[in-house]
Image (tube, rainbow, N blue to C red):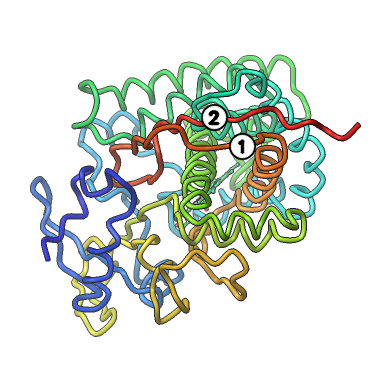
Amino acid sequence: MNIDLLSPASFASGHPLAQYRWLRENQPVFWHEEPNGKGFWAVTRYKDVWEVDRDFQNFSSEPTIMIQDPAAEQALGFGGYKMMLMMDPPQHTAYRKLIRSEFTQPLAADRTPRMNALARQIVDEVIERGECDFVSQVAGEMPSYVIAELLGIPLDDGRELYKLTEAIHTAPEAQEANAGGMAVLKMFEYGRKVIEEKRARPKDDLATKLLQAEVDGKKLDDIEFLLFFLLLVDAGGDTTRNLLSAGLIALFDNPDQLAWLKTDLDSRLPSAREELLRYTSPVIYMRRTAKQDVVLGGQKINEGDKVVMYFGSANRDPEKFTDSDKLDLSRSPNEHIAFGTGPHGCLGQHIARIEIDAILREVLTRMDGLKIAAAAEWLPSNFISGPKHLPVKFKAAKRAA
Ligand code: HEM
C-alpha cells in the first residue's frame, strides 16, 4: 500500500480510508517520510490516539501542532509568542482558564434560542432561490456569525474573517504563494481594530473580557490577544462548516439513515450529530512532539520525534466501533474523538453541537426535495477535511403557521 498522508491529493475526496485501514492493521504507529522535514510517526488506532492526546507529560504541543515546523521567520515574527493550542500545562492551563467559563455547556445551552434564530436567518437568505452552494451560503455562515457574536463584532465582519481561515488551512502548494501568511496578517490587522474599539468602548463580550483578563497578574498584551483572536476565529470556523457539509453528503449517501432521522428529527438529532462527527471527522490531525524516549503501541519513539494523531482513522477503528465504516445515526455509545480529548480537547464543542443541530433542523425541515446538484469539490488540505463547494437544489417547504 502506498502511504501518503502529506499530499493534499490523498484527501481530495475525503479521508484516505483505505490507507488508514492498512495502517491500523499493519503498522499502527508508522514512520512517515517527509520530503522537507525529518519525518513523523503516524498514529492511527483509537487507543494510541487517545493515549497521545491525554499524555501531555510525554507528548508536547510545543513547538507546534502542525506537521511542518514553523519557519524561522514566522517564529521571529511572533517574537516567541504562541497560541494556547501550542502550549503545554501549566502555561496552557492558565491561558485556557481565561476563556473556559465562556464555553461551558450551560452557557452554550443559554445561547440556543439565538443560534436557532441565526440558523433561520441563514436559511431565509437562500430558501426562495431554490439552489445555493451549501458550503459557503449555509454551513459556513453559521460559525462565522456565531464567533462574531461571541467576540462582539458585526456579523458581516465575522463572515469576512471566516473567509481568511480557508486560506490559512489550505495547503501552500494549492494556492497563490504566501496566501496563508497574508490571511494571517489581514486577520491581525482586523484584530488590532477590535483592540482599539473594545478598549475605548468595553462591552459584555469575549473580546472585551480577554482584553481585561490577567495571567499571573499581568494583562494580555496586544500580540497575546491577537493570537487568541486568531485561534477562536480559526478553530470554530471551517471545522463546523465542514461537519455540516460533509455530514450532508454522508446523509445523502445513506438515504435509509436520512429517512430514519427525518421521521423523528428532534429526538434523533443528538445521536445523529455525534455519528456525523465520528464519520466525517473534520480535523484530520494534531501533532505532538515526544518530550523523552517513550514506547507507543509497542513502537519506540525517540525524544524530539514528531507524533501525529489521525482522528479520522481513530474514529473508524473497528476495535472501538462496531461496523466502523457504517453510518449508524442511532449509534450508542459513541465515544468518538472528533473533538480530541485531554487538556486541549475542543473548547467550543458545546457551542458546535448547538450550531450543528440548529442548521440541520432548519435545512431538513424547510428545504423540500433537497438534493445534491453536482459532485462536491474537496478542500486541498491535509489538516482539515471537508468539501470546498457543494451545489444543492431545493424548494421552500410550506411552513405551519
Ligand atoms: C465540528 C466542529 C469542531 C470540531 C470537529 C473541532 C475539533 C477540535 C479539535 C480536534 C481540537 C484539538 C483537540 C486536541 O488537541 O485534543 C480543537 C481545539 C479547539 N477548538 Fe474546536 N472543533 C470544532 C468547533 C469549535 C468551535 C465552534 C470553537 C469555538 C467557538 C472551537 C474552539 C476550539 C479551541 C479554542 C480549541 C483549542 C483548545 C486548547 O488548545 O485548549 N472549536 N477543536
The residue nearer to you, when weighing 222 against 316, is 316
Location of residue 200 in the rendering, given as x and y in whole percent from the top left corner: 70, 14
Residue wearing tag 1: 369
Outermost right residue: 401
The residue nearer to you, when weighing 114 against 21, is 21
Q: Is residue 90 visible?
A: no
Say if mark 1 contacts mark 2, CB within 8 Å: yes
Location of residue 382 in the rendering, given as x and y in whole percent from the top left corner: 28, 46
| Mark closest to the chain's N terminus, 1 or 2 | 1
**Res. 358 mark:** none
- Name above or below for residue 145 compared with residue 59: above
Q: Is residue 91 visible?
A: yes
Q: Residues within 10 Å of mark 1 (few under 14, many from 20)?
A: few
Q: Residues within 10 Å of mark 2 (few under 14, many from 20)?
A: some
Q: Amino acid at mark 2?
A: Lys
Q: Element under label 2?
A: strand
Q: Amino acid at mark 1?
A: Gly
Residue wearing tag 2: 393
Outermost bottom residue: 298
- Name above or below for residue 168 compared with residue 182: below
Location of residue 94 in the rendering, given as x and y in whole percent from the top left corner: 57, 53
Residue sitting at x 63%, y 46%: 356
- Indicate left or right for 123 with 137 as reference: right
- Indicate left or right for 64 with 104 as reference: left
Q: Quadrant of the N terminus?
A: bottom left
Distance between mark 1 and mark 2 Cα atoms: 8 Å
What is the tally of numbered marks visible in this picture?
A: 2
- Indicate left or right for 211 with 390 as reference: right
Residue sitting at x 34%, y 54%: 62
Q: Quadrant of the C terminus?
A: top right
Residue sitting at x 67%, y 19%: 128
